[in-house]
Image (cartoon, helix red, strand yellow):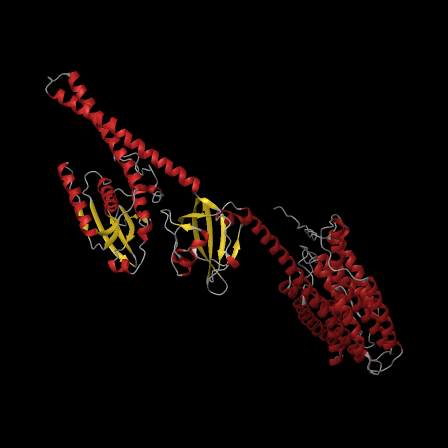
Amino acid sequence: MRITRAVPRPRRPEPDEPPGSVLSYPLARTAAFTALYVVATLAGRLTVLDQMSLSLVWPAAGVAVMWFCAQRGVADLRVDVVAFSVTTVVVNMLTNASAGQAVVFVVSNLAQVSVFVVLISRWRPLLWSLRPEGGLQGPRDLWRVLAAAYLAASTGAVVGTSGLWLATGHFSLITVAVWMARNFAGVLVVGMTGLCVARTVATRWAARRDPATPCGGAAVPAECALVILCSVGAYAVGFGTTHGLPVASTLIALTVWAAVRLPTTFVALHTLSVAVVAVVFTLNGDGPFAAVESTAVRALVVQLFVTVVAVIGFALALSRDERDTLVRQLAEEKDAAGRRAALTRAIIDSMADGLSVVDADGRITLRNPAALRLLGGRISPDDTVVDSGHYGFFHLDGTPLSAAEMPHVRLASGEQIEPVDVLVRNPGVPDGRIINVRTTALPDDHGGHNAVVLFHDVTAERRHRDELAAFAGVVAHDLLNPLTAAEGWTDDADEALQDAPNSPMVDRARQGLVRVKRSTGRMRGLINDLLAYTTARDAAIAPTRVELADLVTDIAAARSDSAAAAGLPVPVFTIGALPVVTADAVLVRQLVDNIVGNAVKYTAPGTTAHVAINGDQRGDLVHVTVTDNGIGIPAGQHEIIFDNFHRAHRHTTHQGTGLGLAICKRIVERHGGTITATDNPDGGSRFTFTLPAAWSPADARDGLNHPVAHR
């Protein structure tokens, strides 16, 4: 069996420790803390009571806390525990403590340090870290340290006094109080001072290596010197020349001065110096606490004074640091917000599209230069939106845009606004410009909505599209003449071959004529669709009352007759309630016939088409739904099937030009509606389109505009 010995893993150095420094190695730190602990222990043993061998002051408690907190990342602390224990025993025995008392001191100090390290590791794990987020960050961290120090000192006092009672037979409450007070003061003053100094040194070192590293607030040398001079004079008078006079409380003012004006590390060093002066003078029988006859009680009182000074100093300094940090963060966030706002404004101003923001009261809160340019330089008076005539807004047919049709007004009324093309013609744009207007709602802080209006110049696009559509119409019309001639000559050739005797050459000629007829039929269908698309796009709309029920019934009958004449399965139509609409009767017939024709055509072979047409009125619109049991629409193509020349089923036997649904979309949009395609849950497709509901002659007499009238 192979036996391996565990090797203590070195603790990784803190990010701010100098790379390769001696203190980066655990053993080097152990040696350094051992030497410091020896000095602190000897200083404490100079204040030993005769009977109990109990030191009245114990700065070693703070050194012990620093030692084991700094070594908390080391995998194996046995070397530190042994060094700590041996040092405690040797120093105490060399200063007239018995072996039993020395063992009690070791156990109580280890118990005290263990409690503090465990509590701080749980409450504030990064307290002893040299990273920026470590150390005392605010009053909350101070209260955690005070709580941990109190519980740790209480543990040490209970263990220590109990051990001394067992070793010497002596026990008193004053011993417990002195033990607890001295350890609590040692942890608070010495421990926190060591932490502050270590972090300051590490920060200065990091700043020297990297000038961009913040090194905290710098002390004002003149004010530091003044605080030191005043403190030396005040404490010399208070503790050196007065005996029993109640002047100790007035000396705290110097700590307050330092805490509110100078860095926390200076406050810690100032507190440590005050503690040394107060303890030394008091134990020698001088100062405001000299009137206390008992040396133990006098030591207790002076350490309570030191604790009060330390708590006040650290609390004020850390509160100021926390406030300064918050102010600095707020300033940084303000600067960052300002930079983001400037960047956003620069982006908005550089946009080619116009952008305006209109609040609920019609005031323009934001406008970029492109918006001003696209509107021909027409500025709103007092940055308030006025009537459409001021800007020269027209429908594409030349009729003026009414005040109720302004985008921000429609949005304020709760209307869902779709993108719309508007003609802008004013002195700044004499030839006119077509802009696409998109309006979205932006909630404000008062529960209302701002209108975000985006202007996009589509004049060139519309011109190109118009030219292309006109070209397609002209080409389609011009192609009809040669196509008609080709069909006529094909029919003549076919009739001539009817009386010819059968032969391989005649049969081949007849098959060729059949192919020619099919090709000319497909060509005629394509040309007719091109003409229909041009008509649906450009022809003037003649709105009238259209009985959808009669129209759909007529189309269904025609489709049934066509299927029967062709020897195909006769489709089954289910026609529900269909409200009356106001639309162009010719275009609506073409719309419904295209959708129903697709429902019948795109059916699986050998399947009877089932087509259901239903409608209902919702407000000013009639929603019509056509549902079939066909082969459906491929995934991801429910929107692009309405594009020009798009065929969803290119690899099937179903013939088509890809313009039928594009024609449907154009017809619906010219009537102010929408059309969508979805899957039928029972299989097949479902098309839904909207048309304006019928309006009565009374509406016309009242001067109400119908949405179709301006399309």
Q: Position of residue 107 (x, y in %)?
A: 72, 68
Q: How many marks?
A: 0
Q: Position of residue 190 (x, y in %)?
A: 77, 66
Using residue 195 as the reference point, say whether residue 350 is left or right of it.
left
Q: Quadrant of residue 170?
A: bottom right
Residue at 70% in and 64% down = 321
Of the pair 159 and 595, the residue shown nearer to us: 595
Q: Quadrant of residue 305?
A: bottom right
Inspect this view and state whether residue 452 appears: yes
Q: Position of residue 711 (x, y in %)?
A: 33, 48
Residue 467, relative to residue 329: is it above or below? above
Residue 433, relative to residue 104: is it above or below? above
Using residue 335 as the reference point, say whether residue 474 is left or right of it.
left
Using residue 644 as the reference point, say whether residue 187 is left or right of it.
right
Q: Position of residue 508 (x, y in %)?
A: 18, 19
Inspect this view and state whether residue 97 appears: no
Of the pair 336 and 362, the residue shown nearer to us: 362
Of the pair 36 and 667, the residue shown nearer to us: 667
